[in-house]
Amino acid sequence: MSIRHGLLALLESGPRHGYQLRAGFEEATGATWPLNIGQVYTTLTRLERDGLVEALPENDGGQRPYRITERGRDEVALWFRTAVGRSERPRDELAIKLSLALVTPGVNVTEVVQRQRTATVRTMQEYTRLKRAEADLPSLLVVDALIFQAEAEIRWLDHCEATILRRRRTTSSKDRSTDSSATTAEGLVP
Amino acid sequence: MNVLELSAVHRIHGHGDTAVAAVRGIDLFVRPGELVAVMGPSGSGKSTVLNLAGGLDAPTRGEVRVEGRHLAQLSRTQLAELRRQRIGYVFQNFNLLPSLTAAENVALPLELDGMSPRRSRRLALAALAEVDLSGIGSRFPNQMSGGQQQRVAIARALVGERRLVLADEPTGALDSQTGEAVLELLRTRVDKGAAGLLVTHDSRHAGWADRVVFLRDGVVVDATSPLSRPESLLEPRA
């Protein structure tokens, strides 16, 4: 996603200027995705260049509203029709970090996992607090999405930790059996 | 003052070579109006901590204090009285008595404490109203849904003068929405001044707490830092 599609969708309900778009975007996303006004105007400039919106004359307050074009409407419709692909989401830095932690000497993976778990549970507390204060349905859905994503991450961390511990146990018991056979072999040597 | 305070608490089961340390030197406190969640894998000592906090089990070493009273220094009668009057329990499987109605279940601890049936019934009905269960006081547990039963259990845990509520996986087999409603209710009651200790493996439930403490192998390995004001979420990210 795209702020681009977000702003276009907001323009479906009528022309708006930059500050209104920013407010609308933040309202719809439960203020979980703050935008700065610069991002909004850069995006509007690109949308205009691509023929998806058109700028209207400035109002009395010196603000320039933008209106969605027919091509813009098609773009919004296409966006809602298309599922979000896994590959379009950013790479998971955490998964990469954990796998590197396993192969980097001197790094305690269990600690890396716990630090992340604590941080994510804390984020969960913050989202839950936000949710308690939220009455507006669109915002509530966004906050819930963040809560479920955090939950998934914590479950995955629990799973990683259990897998790592199980592997270690298997490896160390294998090592022990190798050691004992070595001793026996040595014992046989005169 | 802390409602609950565990200082350097150890709990060792068995002796000698077969001794198993369930809890090893835990410090934990819960203030009024605070909900603290304890998370950790199975066998990390979560339930032991809850049992020690409620005086259902005694530490091998260290002190457990409820409202400043050192549990080990109380007689059996005093401890039983403290448990009945000041501590409420919410269990995974509700633990309602099947042969008693909702109101009777809630009134039971008060009556056991010598309160008149009429007065304890009145308090029980008020407690049920507070968990949104007005009008079902005369139903038996098997005539209620799981969510309603757990709300009755919460009403029972908080009826009267109870200041400490101990919850062990309180949403057990409830569906996600009902479970969340139970947590919200617990949170609301704690906000009104009770102290809550919640044992859970579910991070979404821990999200309702003010602080989350992580246990592993009987030791506190980490805890979340206190929450800042909610507005901090609204600051644009770098």
Image (spheres, grey):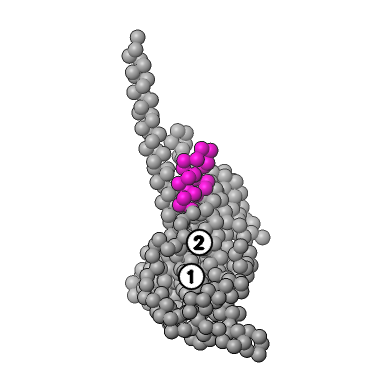
| In the rendered image, the vertical position of residue A124 relative to residue B178, given as above or below | above
The quarter in which the C terminus of chain B is drawn is bottom right
Which chain letter matches label 1?
A: A
Disc 1 target residue: A2
Mark 1 surroundings: few (<14), some (14-19) or many (≥20) residues within 10 A = few
* SS type, badge 2: helix
Horizontal and vertical percent position of residue A71:
43, 81
Q: What range is drawn magenta here?
A: A94-113
User: Camera-side residue: A78 or B225?
Assistant: A78
| In the rendered image, the vertical position of residue B195 relative to residue B22, given as above or below | below
Q: What residue type is labelled 1?
A: Ser
Mark 2 surroundings: few (<14), some (14-19) or many (≥20) residues within 10 A = many
| In the rendered image, the vertical position of residue A149 relative to residue A102, given as above or below | below
* SS type, badge 1: loop
Q: How many badges with numbers are in the image?
A: 2
Q: In this orientation, does residue A29 appear?
A: no
| In the rendered image, the vertical position of residue B99 relative to residue B199, given as above or below | below
Q: Which amino acid does label 2 sit on?
A: Ala
Q: Residue at x 34, y 19 (%)?
A: A184
Which chain letter matches label 2?
A: B
From the image, give the main secondary structure of the stretch colored magenta: helix
Task: Answer whether residue A95 is magenta in the image.
Answer: yes
Disc 2 target residue: B206
Q: Which residue is drawn at 44% across and 75% down?
A: B103
Horizontal relation, residue B41 to residue B78: left or right = left
Horizontal and vertical percent position of residue B160:
55, 70
